[in-house]
C-alpha cells in the first residue's frame, strides 16, 4: 500500500512511496536529493522482495520436497520395468499398450503430473497426494487379485520404486498435518 513519504517543495502536493520517477507528478519539479534517496531505498527493497519470490518457486509451493520428488519419481517409474517376464522387463508404459485394463496404468503418471502441477502452483495438493500415492498400491492389490501371490516372484525395480514413492507421498501428507 503506497504511503505519503514527503511533500513537493514547489506545489506542496504529496509524494507517494510508489513513485517511479524523480519528478513531482503534479508540477514536474525535480525532487530534492533526500526524497529521491528515500524513493530509491523503497524501490530497492521492493526489487529485493520480488527477487526472493522469483528465485525459489519450490519454497513457495505447499508441497514438501519429498512429495515433489515422490510424484516425479512415480512418473519416471512408469517407464522402468515393473515385471520380469521370460527375462524381459515390462514397464507400466508397456502395460498401457495392452489396452483394456492395461490403460489403468496411465492413472499413475497422469495423477502424479497433476499433483505436481497443483502443488508447485502453491495450491493445497494433500488430497491429490493421497490419491496419487494410493495408485500403485491399488494397482498392486488389483493385480494380486487377478494373478495371485506368484506376482511377487516377477516384480521388478519399477514396481518396487513406484510402491515406495506412493508410500512416501502418503506418509509425507500425513506428516504435514
Image: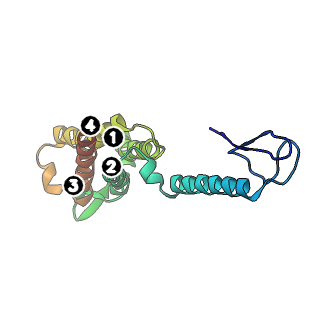
Determine which of the numbered discs, if any, sits on residue 67 in the image: 2
Label 1 or label 3, whichever comes before in sequence order: 1
Numbered disc in front, either 4 or 2: 4
Q: Nearer the viewer, residue 56 or 33?
A: 33
Q: Which residue shows up at 30% across the image and 57% down it?
A: 90
Residue matched to label 1: 129
| 10 Å crowding of disc 3: few (<14), some (14-19), many (20+) | some
Q: Residue furthest top?
A: 127
Residue matched to label 3: 160
- Quarter of the picture containing the C terminus is top left
3D distance between C-alphas at marks 4 and 2: 14 Å
Contact, mark 1 vs mark 2 (Cβ under 8 Å): yes
| 10 Å crowding of disc 1: few (<14), some (14-19), many (20+) | many
Task: Give percent across and percent down for residue 5.
Answer: 68, 44
3D distance between C-alphas at marks 2 and 3: 17 Å
Label 2 or label 3, whichever comes before in sequence order: 2
Q: Which residue shows up at 39% across the image and 42% down it?
A: 111
3D distance between C-alphas at marks 1 and 2: 8 Å
Numbered disc in front, either 1 or 4: 4
3D distance between C-alphas at marks 1 and 3: 18 Å
Label 1 or label 2, whichever comes before in sequence order: 2
Task: Give percent across and percent down for residue 4.
Answer: 68, 40
Residue matched to label 4: 177
Mark 4: secondary structure: loop
Q: Nearer the viewer, residue 175 or 99?
A: 175
Amino acid at each position: 500500500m503506497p504511503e505519503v513519504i514527503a511533500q513537493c517543495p514547489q506545489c506542496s502536493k504529496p509524494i507517494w512511496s510508489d513513485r517511479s520517477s524523480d519528478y513531482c507528478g503534479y508540477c514536474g519539479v525535480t525532487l530534492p536529493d533526500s526524497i529521491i534517496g528515500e524513493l530509491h531505498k523503497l524501490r530497492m527493497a521492493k526489487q529485493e522482495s520480488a527477487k526472493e519470490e522469483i528465485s525459489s518457486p519450490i519454497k513457495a509451493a505447499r508441497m514438501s520436497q519429498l512429495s515433489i520428488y515422490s510424484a516425479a519419481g512415480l512418473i519416471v517409474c512408469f517407464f522402468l520395468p515393473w515385471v520380469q517376464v521370460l527375462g524381459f522387463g515390462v514397464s507400466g508404459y508397456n502395460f498401457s499398450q495392452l489396452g483394456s485394463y492395461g490403460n489403468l496404468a496411465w492413472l499413475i503418471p497422469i495423477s502424479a503430473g497433476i499433483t505436481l502441477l497443483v502443488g508447485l502452483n502453491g495450491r493445497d495438493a494433500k488430497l491429490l497426494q493421497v490419491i496419487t500415492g494410493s495408485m500403485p498400491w491399488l494397482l498392486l492389490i488389483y493385480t494380486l487379485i487377478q494373478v495371485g501371490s506368484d506376482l511377487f516372484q516377477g516384480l521388478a525395480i519399477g514396481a518396487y520404486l513406484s510402491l515406495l514413492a506412493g508410500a512416501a507421498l502418503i506418509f509425507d501428507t500425513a506428516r504435514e498435518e
